[in-house]
Amino acid sequence: MPEDDPQEDSQPQDSGAAQPAGSDSANSGSGSSKFHMPKKKYIIAVAAVVIALAVVAGLFLMPVPKPAEEIKTTNATTPVVKVCVQKNFLVYPNRNELAAGDFVSVTAGIRNDAYDGDHHFLINAFPDAVSSSVLTGYNCTDMQSCVIPGGLNLTDFMLSWLSWDTSSLYVAKDDSQSKTVSVKIPAFVEPGYYMFDLVACRDDYQKMNISQCTVQNFTWSDCPQQLEIVVS
């Protein structure tokens, strides 16, 4: 078969011409692997480029978080929670999720860390804030002037949910005592967030009236403690 001889003779020449000098493939003498290494490197390079492009695209497509101040001013469902942790006055649990008609009891605890001995204390509570969804449900624009169906002011309506012993609480030096604050959600109430401020006052001579212990002039701890009620 004379026609086959030139093809057989030409195979080593083609193999030698295709292989770079000093390559492992050229030294191996295997014609079937002469393009193996360049092809593999090409595939790896293409894959690396695809992955890099995907990562960059993902960074541009990720949602950018809103600044904290913007979240506070535009959030239409949750009022801003004021964080103030105290070691000598605590409300627990300070967040409760309830349905209309539900009941829960929370603890308002006082630790007497005063340097000058035993004292009596008062605990009082005040409505502080509601979510905008509550105001919308009652067709109101602000909490202070909001009047709910039945003619009751919203703040008075919220305060009627709470009950607790308003008499003074004796606490010995370096001791802790507490009062229970009961929360009863009415059967008909707009869902949303309702926030209360609880304050404590030191009543040294048992002459302070509960009405004098307010958010403006409380005399125990550095700040009010918040009680958050989420009505579903």
Image (spheres, grey):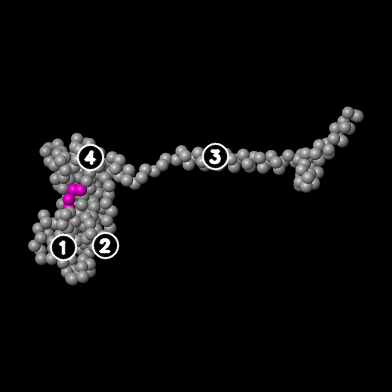
**Upstream in the sequence, badge 1 or badge 4?**
4
Q: How far apart in space, not on screen, are marks 2 and 3 (Cα)?
A: 52 Å
Asked if marks 1 and 4 touch (Cβ < 8 Å), the reply is no
Task: Identify the element where label 2 is drawn.
Answer: loop
In front: 88, or 59?
59
Q: Amino acid at mark 3?
A: Leu
Residue with the mark numbered 4: 134
Picture disc at residue 53: 3
Q: Residues within 10 Å of mark 2 (few under 14, many from 20)?
A: few
**Upstream in the sequence, badge 1 or badge 2?**
2
- The x and y percentages for residue 112 are 21, 66
Q: Amino acid at mark 1?
A: Arg
Image quarter in which the N terminus is found: top right
Q: How far apart in space, not on screen, are marks 3 and 4 (Cα)?
A: 47 Å
Q: How far apart in space, not on screen, are marks 1 and 4 (Cα)?
A: 34 Å
Task: Identify the element where label 4 is drawn.
Answer: helix
* Magenta stretch contains residue 124: yes
Residue at the image point whose x is 91% and y is 29% from the top: 2
Picture disc at residue 87: 2
